[in-house]
């Protein structure tokens, strides 16, 4: 399976964005990909507090550490590209990891 890192919004409309990221994971799986969405994994209750700047930075760094293992970065754009997503895109380009842009039907 092709390993992909999912980039999608998290902050702001968190409930909507969690639902959207789950749909993005499903989309990747149905394409035969092995996705990771660190922003969903690390923000689960009892893991890290996204409202604590120190813990948020730790989660971002941990997510970026997976990037060199990926075959591609997949950016889901239906709700725009957040500053965090843009930083990940720039990091991927620096590491010469392909960046793909995708859209899902909004529900």
Image: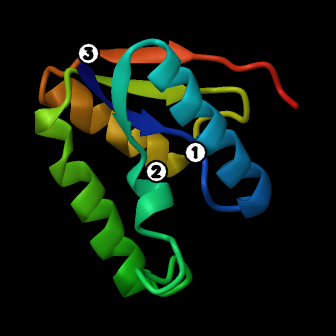
Looking at the image, is mark 3 or mark 1 earlier in the sequence?
1
Q: Position of residue 97 (x, y in %)?
A: 19, 22
The Cα atoms of the two marked residues, 1 and 2, are separated by 5 Å
Q: At x 43% / y 61%, what residue is drawn?
A: 41
Secondary structure of the residue carrying numbered label 2: helix
The Cα atoms of the two marked residues, 3 and 1, are separated by 19 Å
- Give residue 5's quadrant in the image: top left
Looking at the image, is mark 3 or mark 2 earlier in the sequence?
2
On residue 98, which mark appears? 3
Q: Position of residue 105 (x, y in %)?
A: 79, 19
Q: At x 14% / y 20%, what residue is drawn?
A: 96
Relative horizontal placement of residue 49, taking residue 60 as reference (left or right): right
Q: Give the quadrant of the N terminus.
A: top left
Indicate which label's residue lies in the foreground, 3 or 1. 3
Q: At x 39% / y 15%, what residue is drawn?
A: 32
Q: Which residue is mark 2?
A: 84
- Give residue 11's quadrant in the image: bottom right
Q: At x 46% / y 24%, what residue is drawn?
A: 29
Q: Are marks 3 and 2 in contact (CB under 8 Å)?
A: no
Q: Which residue is mark 1?
A: 82
Secondary structure of the residue carrying numbered label 1: loop
Mark 1: few, some, or many residues within 10 Å (few <14, many ≥20)? Answer: some
| Front one among 105 and 53 | 105
The Cα atoms of the two marked residues, 3 and 2, are separated by 18 Å
Q: Are marks 1 and 2 in contact (CB under 8 Å)?
A: yes
Mark 3: few, some, or many residues within 10 Å (few <14, many ≥20)? Answer: some
């Amino acid at each position: 399976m092709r390993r992909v890192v999912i980039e999608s919004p998290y902050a702001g409309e968190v409930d909507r964005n969690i639902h959207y990221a789950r749909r993005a994971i499903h989309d990747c799986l149905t394409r035969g990909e092995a996705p990771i969405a660190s922003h969903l994994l690390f923000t689960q209750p009892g893991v890290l507090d996204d409202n604590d700047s120190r813990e948020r930075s730790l989660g971002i760094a941990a997510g970026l550490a997976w990037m060199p293992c990926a075959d591609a970065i997949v950016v889901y754009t239906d709700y725009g590209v957040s500053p965090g997503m843009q930083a990940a895109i720039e990091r991927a380009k620096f590491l010469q990891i392909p960046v793909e842009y995708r859209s899902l039907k909004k529900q």
